[in-house]
Amino acid sequence: GVVFVLAHGAGGSKRDPLLVALAAELGRRGHGVARFDFAYREAGRKLPDRQPALLATYRSVLAHLRTLPGVRHLLVGGKSMGGRMATLLAAEAEPVSGVLALGYPLHPAKRPEKLRDAHLPAIAVPALFLSGTRDPLCDLDLMRPRVAAMQRATLLELEQGDHSLGVPKRANRTRAEVIGWACDAAERVLVEPLLAAR
């Protein structure tokens, strides 16, 4: 009854390698996964729509999933912009069971003063943020206190990880190991509490 809904980043699509790999591993572990393209990507455009249109697309996907038999819990998330849209939905009390943000874009690259954090304290459901220590869009010294101030949030850091949770060869960690780490965290923080509450 648990379905992860994964949205892509501004320059990506539902075929983003990170989302594809996560979906495959979560599916292998028995979880439902839905990936989708925002309307601008469906239309073949590269420039993202404005926030209201992005949120409307995400809401339409959730509305469809709620019509499917057996769907009990929707865990919303995604990569970068897609994860940010998921946090906005949760902050606006969209009925979801949790949030999985991969490479949360706390600020534009090299502009840490332009924070995208005002809505985060309003998120009441469990939220998991997976961030790389080399992510230019998420200064972890700024992210840590913001996650700590949230009601039910967890921040896990991928040593030497970039914005796409990629690590250099010197990190001695395979892509499969990174994907496993991300899925282990998602199960522990987001799925297991739902199953325990049954």
Image (cartoon, rainbow, N blue to C red):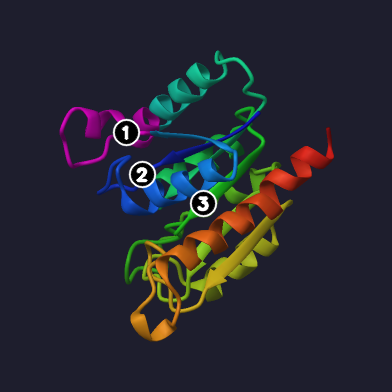
Compared with 167, 129 (above or below) is above
**Can I make out residue 119 in this image?**
no
Residue 101 vertical placement versus 172 (above, below):
above
Q: At 31% from the left edge and 35% from the top edge, which residue is drawn?
A: 50
- Which residue is under mark 2? 8
| Image quarter of residue 134 | bottom left
Q: Secondary structure at mark 1?
A: loop
Residue 106 percent location from the top left of the image: 46, 60
Q: Which residue is mark 1?
A: 37
Q: Amino acid at mark 3?
A: Ala
Q: Look at label 2 and name its amino acid.
A: His
| Mark 2–mark 1 distance (CA, rounded to whole Å) | 7 Å
Q: Crowdedness of circle 1 by 10 Å Cα count: few (<14), some, many (20+)?
A: many
Question: For residue 123, what is the image quadrant?
Answer: top right
Point out the stretch of residues depicted in magenta: 36-54
The image's mark for residue 101 is 3
Q: The C terminus appears in which quarter of the rendering? A: top right
